[in-house]
Amino acid sequence: MGRQQWNTADIIVIREPDHFVAVGSELVFDRSEPPARPLHLHARQDSASSLPTGIPAPTSSNQSAASSTTSGPLSTDTPTQTTALPSPFDSTLGNNFTTQSCPNFFQSFLSNTTFQHCLPLSLLLQRQLTVDPQTSNGFFATAKSKVLLSQTLDVSCKANFTICAPLMASLAQQLQLPANCASDFAMQNPTVLQAYNGLIAYPPLYHAGCLTDTGGQYCVANAMTNASSPTSSYIYYLPLGLQLPNGTKPACNMCLQNTMAIFATAAGNSSVPLSGDYTSAAQQVDAGCGTQFAEASVENGSSSSLLGSRSLYGFLMMGFLVTWLLA
């Protein structure tokens, strides 16, 4: 360390590390405080933008993206932003098509932004019926959690029905065109039939899927996660042309009654699957919940979809064959 000197009128005092020095014949002591060591200080980041050391603080979207690469022992992320929404046909379509135009049509409407914003519950439910879970990874996982299922329904129910309903009807018609999937539709290709029935079932399942109970919980989410009455969810497959298995005992509540009222209105249209399976379902519901709990006097049309006469139990038993055909 360099020496510091002070000039006085009589003597020169030189500061040394030992704090004294002999000058001439005198021993002069320097009793002042030693100089402080220089501190090398750096400008500190503002506290609002400093990097987290443990639990991250809320940040803006840009800061969150940058800090997401740092690791920490804990995370305060909420599940609403960490789990992607499920989507219809979210895995391979398989190669069981007679023409390439059909899978091309699927890829076209599945990648359409308007279709994606609709997030049709009818197609999510339809894909869940396949035995192989790989055919609908997203919704299989979502249906196990009431929270995640409710978040999915939030998106589906916020969709503009006046835009989505005509879109689904148009896609159902386009699917049957020779330039798209006509030959596969005629041959009852399982994937094509599932898509068709899911598209035409959009209106009743939109309205039924968005029903809530007195506590504001989605009725369909309650039914699908009801451990004490696991068959409650079977009601929601009626618009897809799947009859209730014998012995089905859904929970008798306002949600069920309002859902059956929606389905009763839709069942009057002979071109939809509900026209072929609603009456028998209403009779089962009335048997378990009381006479006239559900409207059972709906006049059914003479025609129904290709899956209209297939029972839920029979469809599930045929799932292995469906999986083999799609492989």
Image: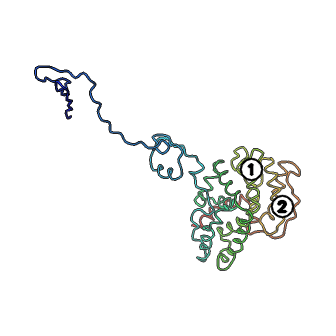
Q: Where's the N terminus, which quadrant?
A: top left
Residue 172 or 216: which is nearer the viewer? 216
Position of 57 with respect to 206 (left or right) is left
Q: Secondary structure at mark 1?
A: helix
Image coordinates of residue 235 in percent, x first then y, are 76, 55
Residue 61 drawn at (x, y percent): 53, 52
Say whether residue 142 is left or right of residue 38.
right
* 297 vs 205, nearest the viewer: 205
Q: Dot 1: within a 10 Å radius of its alpha carbon, few (fewer than 14), some, or many (20 or more) residues?
A: many
Report the number of discs: 2
The residue wearing badge 2 is 265
Name the image quarter holding residue 172. bottom right
Residue type at tag 2:
Thr
Left or right: 321 with respect to 65?
right
| 122 horizontally vs 294: left or right | left
- Distance, label 1 to label 2, CA atoms, is 18 Å
Give the percent coordinates (x, y) of residue 254.
81, 48
Residue at point 22%, 23% (across, down): 30
Q: Which one is earlier in the sequence, the residue at label 1 or at label 2?
A: 1
Give whichever of 57, 249 is nearer the camera.
Answer: 57
- Which residue is identified by label 1? 219
Q: Secondary structure at mark 2?
A: helix
Residue 305, placed above or below residue 264 = below
